[in-house]
């Protein structure tokens, strides 16, 4: 067992009921994170970060799977190491956000909620644009 594996195993919870609950919450968060890739209403990275936090405390195998996943791992690793969000992910996120946000605003019957949705879209866009982009090797 190397140092990182020892550190991970020391964070794991020994209560089996709590471990299974964390695995279930982690699985739900991964599912919501994957949906968030396609639905801009759901935030991808926060759900995947929550899944990683659940997995690190419940299952080293699932935690490692998430980090090693060719698509999902990139979201978690770039955010955790502070390198930000890849340009391709930024473009895709903003494209999907602004392709679906007008429809969401149109479908909501209350004008105050429409304004709030527009402001949320604007704030999310600003946040995404301000994130750094990882340096490519």
Image (tube, rainbow, N blue to C red):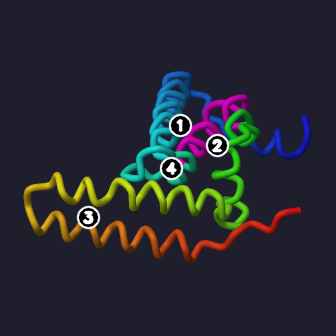
The residue located at (67%, 31%) in the rendering is 62
Q: Which residue is mark 1?
A: 30
The answer to whether residue 87 of the structure is visible from this angle is yes
Secondary structure of the residue carrying numbered label 3: helix
Which of the pair 72/91 is nearer the observer?
91
Q: Nearer the viewer, residue 42 or 50?
A: 42
**Mark 4–mark 1 distance (CA, rounded to whole Å):** 9 Å
Q: CA distance from mark 4 to mark 2?
A: 9 Å
Give the SS element for disc 1.
Answer: helix
Tell me where residue 40 appears, x and y as whole percent. Answer: 41, 52
Please say whether residue 53 is one of the residues in the magenta stretch: yes
Q: Which residue is mark 4?
A: 44
**Residue of label 3:** 117
Q: With 108 as the anchor, is 56 left or right in this view?
A: right
C-beta proximity under 8 Å, tags 2 and 1? yes
Q: Residues within 10 Å of mark 4 (few under 14, many from 20)?
A: many
Q: Which residue is mark 2?
A: 72
Gap between marks 4 and 3 measured at Cα:
18 Å
Percent across and percent down for residue 119 are 29, 72
Magenta part of the protein: which range?
A: 50-63
Report how far apart the C-alphas of labels 2 and 1 lie in the structure.
Answer: 9 Å
- Could you tell which of marks 1 and 3 lies nearer the N-terminus? 1
Residue that appears at 49% across and 34% down: 31
Q: Element under label 4? A: helix
Upstream in the sequence, badge 4 or badge 1? 1
């Amino acid at each position: 067992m190397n140092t990182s594996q020892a550190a991970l195993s020391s964070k794991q919870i020994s209560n089996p009921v709590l471990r299974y609950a964390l695995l279930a919450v982690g699985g739900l968060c991964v599912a919501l994170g994957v949906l968030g890739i396609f639905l801009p209403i759901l935030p991808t990275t926060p759900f995947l970060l929550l899944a990683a936090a659940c997995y690190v405390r419940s299952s080293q195998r699932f935690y490692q799977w998430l980090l090693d996943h060719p698509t999902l791992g990139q979201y978690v690793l770039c955010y955790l190491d502070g390198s930000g969000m890849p340009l391709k992910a930024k473009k895709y996120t903003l494209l999907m956000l602004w392709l679906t946000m007008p429809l969401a605003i149109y479908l909501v019957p209350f004008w105050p909620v429409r304004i709030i949705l527009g402001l949320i879209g604007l704030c999310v866009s600003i946040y995404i644009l301000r994130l750094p982009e990882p340096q490519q090797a």
